[in-house]
Amino acid sequence: MKEARVYLDYHATTPIDNRVFNAMLPFLKEDFGNPSSTFHSYGWKTREAVNDARKTIAASFKAQPREIIFTSGSTESNNLAIRGVTAKYRTKGNHIITCSTEHKSVLSVCSYLENLGVNVTYLPVDRNGLLDLNKLYDAITDTTILISLMTANNEIGVIHPMKEIGRITKEKNIIFHTDATQAVGKMKLDVDELGIDLMSLTGHKIYGPKGIGILYVRSENPTVQLEPQITGGSQENNLRAGTLNVPGIIGLAKAIELCDELYQEEIHSTKNLRDMLLEGIRQNIDNIGVNGSLEHRIPNNLNISFRGIEAQALLMMLDDIALSLGSACLGSTIEPSHVLRALYIPEEDMYSAVRFGLGRFTSDEEIQYVIERLTETVPMLRSQQPSRKKTKTTTAKEGNKYE
Ligand SMILES: Cc1ncc(COP(=O)(O)O)c(C=O)c1O
């Protein structure tokens, strides 16, 4: 295997931005105090820095600083949100609504809770990965306490209609949690405008460090209460015990600040590069299908089925390009992803699907290079490989029927 020279797996993780790294450095060295130490300046200094970071993060989402709870990342935030609400509101009801295309860290919590007697509705999506809001309405009962729907999908990049979901949850007086991991920096997230009560995000998808994230927890209209899942200290309003990850928190705040600063320029340039990639693939390779709606999609994602080949074989041939088959969190398995399954696309399209994730450091030249490599490799593999189920050859236009 060659060392990859082009990184197109930004949904899996991102490199730390130098500006983030520089902001973190002092807190890895001289400013090492524990913010819970109240009797000396080491503690005061980091406490103040954490307070400032909390303010920066809150301001980005139009939230209050006290509504920001630091966690180790989105997996933990999703756990705290869903388990925390279910435990706290047990007497009010025991029904949760989510969606079949959610990240595993939501789905596995839901499945665990089902074993404990909680009722969970998994909303389906259509062929484009989109929700039917009438189905959401119909699923709501008197016992529904939580609706957990991700902002943008990590495999197909499809965006759920946040504003409408927020409106429904407010009308029905149900807590709304969203996993915004893949949406931060790609969409404006105003918790009041979108009616969000709980929101998970993580540092390592936005050029910040790994092992740090937040759960936004609404404090008024309504006041959301949670049962803590990690106990043993009074940190984070008694919602998440443990010494704060100060360098991580400083890095996360800087990463979010940069996302806001670069927002317009970044979504514009990433979308241009993504469109260039799609156009290059369409012009040079026939019989492909884009999985998920192109219209309702974050600007840095493409998920394409190259019919007639196994995506795994393609990625092995393209070992100078870092790509992913499906969700990175399931990276080592070759089971078709649950997201593509939920779209009910043909089995063969699931096995031939490749996820392209573009990011801050993706260049024009890199995209040209990827198009060239795909253009030489896909036909070569098609001529060699007995596909899982021989497809009839269609034109590139016919091939794009999932757009
Ligand atoms: C949508 C989504 N939610 C949750 C996670 C988990 O995030 P973390 O790695 O911070 O636990 C991921 C990571 O792949 C993700 O893409």
Image: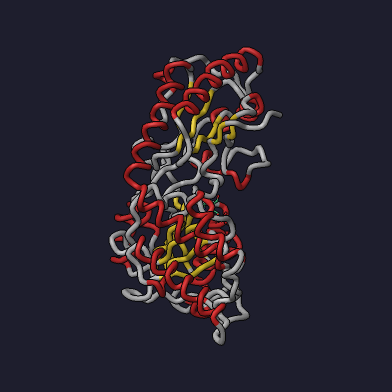
> Which quadrant, please, contains the C terminus?
top left
Q: Position of residue 39 (x, y in %)?
A: 56, 87
Figure quadrant of residue 1:
top right
Compared to residue 290, the image places residue 9 above or below, namely below
**Residue 143 visible in the current orientation:** no
* 24 w.r.t. 228: above or below: above
**Near-viewer residue (155 or 210):** 210
Give coordinates of residue 374: x percent, y percent. 54, 21
Toward the viewer: 359 or 39? 39
- Whether residue 260 is visible here, answered yes or no, is yes
Q: Residue at x 55, y 31 (%)?
A: 353
Instruction: Locate residue 153 relative to residue 188 in the image: left or right.
Output: right
Residue 63 is situated, as x and y percent measured from the top left of the image, at 35, 67
User: For this rendering, which residue is in front, 20 or 354?
Assistant: 20
Quick one: which residue is furthest to the front in this view? 30
Residue 312: which quarter of the image?
top right
Q: In this view, does 161 lie to the left or right of 254?
A: left
Residue reaching furthest bottom? 39
Rendered position, 329 above or below 85: above
Query: Which residue occupies 57% across, 20% down?
Result: 308
Residue 282 location (% of width, % of height): 43, 20
Which residue corresponds to the image point at 51% horizontal and 42% vertical from the top-left?
155
